[in-house]
Every structure is written in C-alpha cells, then in structure tokens.
Image (spheres, rainbow, N blue to C red):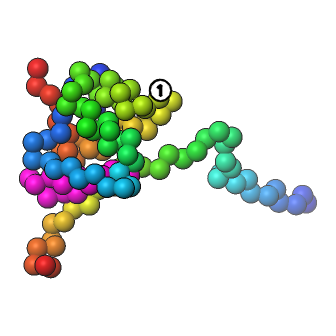
C-alpha cells in the first residue's frame, strides 16, 4: 500500500505574473438619501 | 470597448482629482467611481482631445505592456456609463 501523494497546490505563483489590482472601484450612493 | 474608437466622459459626469487618482460622480445614475491611479485620470482627461482611447493612453504615458490593464479599467467605466462612445 503506497502512501498518499501530497496534494498539489493550485495557487503556485507564476514567475513574472503579478495580479493586476483593479484601477477602478465603483460605489453606488443609492439608499444613502436621508443620511445627511 | 474598442480602444481604437473615440470615447468621451458622459456629460453628466463630474471629475474631481484626488491625491490617489480621482473621483468620478455620475449625476444621472448617482454612482461614484474611484480612479485609483493618476495616470488613469490623465487617460480620462485626454479622451476629449484624442481620436481614440488608445491615443489617450499613449499620451498619458501608458506603455503597451500596461495597456490591457488600462483597457480593463476603461471597460469598467463604460459599463457604469461614465464613458460614452463619441458620435461620429
């Protein structure tokens, strides 16, 4: 009986690949009426 | 969006430059968009005088390697109606 193989990580970083942070963030102010 | 087309800010959108980039407010949809990059603000400001979004990016100093990231950002602004395609 062989030992179970270690699970490979699917989150291995790839050289030179940097996840690009979004340059835009959106916010809706609907529902904020009456707050001020 | 097509980077080779001309785009403009929606006439109901106000831009306020900020140290982190800019705030865009759409008076029609009451949506806010945060531009988290000063170069993206330059791109948006250049749109009005550029024949295409690609030209606006180049004028703002966006290199070819960065272009997909800025294209994604501009697409988000089109989806939220901050940018509209210029009528010919």
Residue A26 drawn in magenta: no
Residue B84 x %, y %: 17, 36
Label 1 Cα neighbours within 10 Å, binned few <14 / some 14-19 / many ≥20: few
Residue under the point 54% across and 47% down? A19
Left or right of B81? Residue A34 is left
At numbered mark 1, what does the secondary structure look like: helix, strand or loop? loop
Residue at 19% across, 31% down: B48
Residue B3 horizontal/vertical position (percent): 31, 26
Q: Give residue A2's position: percent from left, percent from top.
A: 90, 58
Residue labelled with disc 1: B64
Number of on-image labels: 1
Q: Position of residue B86 (x, y in %)?
A: 15, 28
Q: Is B65 above or below relative to B25?
A: above
On the question of residue B81 being in view, the answer is yes
**Magenta-tinted stretch:** B22-36
Q: Nearer the viewer, residue B53 or B59?
A: B59
Quadrant for residue B40, please give it: top left
Res. B74 image quadrant: top left
Q: Residue furthest bottom?
A: A35
In this view, the residue in front, B5 or B15, is B15
Q: Chain of mark 1?
A: B
Name the main secondary structure of what is drawn in magenta. strand
Please identify the quadrant where the N terminus of chain B is shown: top left
In the rendered image, the vertical position of residue B65 relative to residue A25, given as above or below: above
Return the residue nearer the eye: B66 or B20.
B20
* Residue B3 visible in the picture: no
Residue that protrudes farthest toward the right in the picture = A1
Q: Is residue B28 magenta?
A: yes
> Residue at coordinates 70% horizontally, 54% vertically from top-left?
A9
Q: Residue visible at 27% across and 38% down?
A: B44
Q: Quadrant of residue B39?
A: top left
Pick the quarter of the image with the C terminus of chain B: top left
């Amino acid at each position: 009986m062989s030992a179970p193989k270690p699970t490979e990580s699917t989150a291995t970083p790839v050289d030179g690949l940097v996840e690009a942070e979004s340059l835009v963030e959106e916010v809706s102010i609907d529902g904020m009426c009456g707050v001020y | 969006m097509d980077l080779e087309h001309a785009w403009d800010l929606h006439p109901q959108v106000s831009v306020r430059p900020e140290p982190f980039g800019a705030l865009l407010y759409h008076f029609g949809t009451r949506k806010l968009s945060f531009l988290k990059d000063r170069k993206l603000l330059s791109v948006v400001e250049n749109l009005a005088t550029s024949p295409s979004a690609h030209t606006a990016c180049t004028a703002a100093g966006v290199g070819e390697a960065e272009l997909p990231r800025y294209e994604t950002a501009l697409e988000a602004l089109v989806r939220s109606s901050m940018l509209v395609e210029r009528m010919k």
